[in-house]
Image (cartoon, coloured by chain):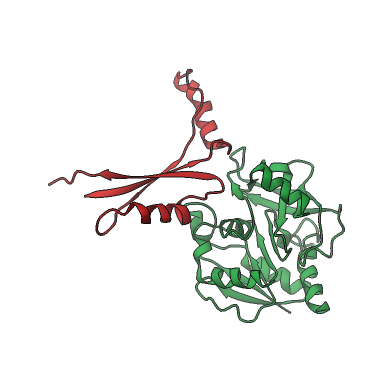
Amino acid sequence: MKIGVVTFPGSLDDRDAARAARIAGAEAIPLWHADPDLHGVDAVVLPGGFSYGDYLRCGAIARFAPVMESIKHAAAGGLPVLGICNGFQILCEAHLLPGALTRNQHLHFRNRDQWLRMENTASPWTSAYESGQEILVPVKNGEGCYVADEKTLDMLEENGQVVARYINGNPNGSMRDIAAIRNEAGNVLGIMPHPEHAVEELTGPSLDGLGFFVSVLKMAVAQ
Amino acid sequence: MARVVVDVMLKPEILDPQGQAVANALPRLGVSDVASVRIGRRVEIEFEGEPDLERAREIADKLLANPVIEDYSVHVECVKVES
């Protein structure tokens, strides 16, 4: 199975995302922002970082990258897409996910290990987790405060599109403690914390993040 | 010469922690009668030909503002060219 990882100018977690994909047992394929060709990948990760220097708004310019046109099109056809941190911001700016990510309420950049509770796990990226499972992964963001209007938030809850919530403290003021959401179909998922940094003992606080990459692999094998 | 100015502001219901931080600093200047501060962004666009409000509106809607969290307004401004 091939997992594509996009590099934008200013991406910085693309290597870690590719490594996580490899540790899970997939082949990691580097994708380039200016190349609209998805090179036959079975899933795509939009990694963390500061694409285009976070100019204007985080993710606002990356949204117009040639590769994003192809990803938008493929996502509508069911391609699994995982946006982590800046990738989540890009997915919201591209209107592939509802809502927006804004400046942390306390204005500080937060960098720490963070407990999450998995909520709805019925998606290609989360089937390896149990609903209610608590996981520990790093969080590191300055603009991770998830906001949406009440109607959208209610809709997310009703449709089971809230994938994970912060527990033991909300690091950025996100509404309803939302750490991760998915689209209605389930194939597009955005998460603010970093599962790709929690995939091996040497460098992560746990191995809890590996499940995202294992899930999508399992789905591909099953097909 | 004329330019189009786009003002982008967070919607009233969206919390503006930056504005709050500025408001909280004002008493240190001895200013105590400010009820609230909100911070936005001003973008100046110069077209090669005549200023085009419609095009500017499209640019604002698609790129300069995120309509999920921000409102924008567009107007033409005359600029004095120094000779």
Q: Position of residue B57 (x, y in %)?
A: 40, 52
Q: Residue furthest bottom?
A: A40
Q: Is residue A95 visible?
A: yes
Q: Position of residue A51 (x, y in %)?
A: 53, 60
Q: Foreground: A34 or A27?
A: A34
Q: Foreground: B73 or A79?
A: B73
Chain letter corresponding to the colour red? B
Quadrant in the picture for residue A12: bottom right
Q: Is residue A174 visible?
A: no
Q: Foreground: B17 or B4?
A: B4
Q: Which quadrant does the N terminus of chain A fall into?
A: bottom right
Q: Position of residue A6 (x, y in %)?
A: 59, 70
Q: Which quadrant does the C terminus of chain A fall into?
A: bottom right
Q: Residue furthest left?
A: B83
Horizontal arrangement in the rendering, residue A156 relative to residue A56 (left or right): right
**Residue at (69% x, 51% y) in the render:** A139
- Chain A: colour as depicted: green
Horizontal arrangement in the rendering, residue A58 relative to residue A138 (left or right): left
**Residue at (62% x, 37% y) in the render:** A106
Horizontal arrangement in the rendering, residue A91 relative to residue A165 (left or right): left
**Residue at (70% x, 46% y) in the render:** A153
A142 up-or-down from B34: above or below: below
Quadrant in the picture for residue A203: bottom right
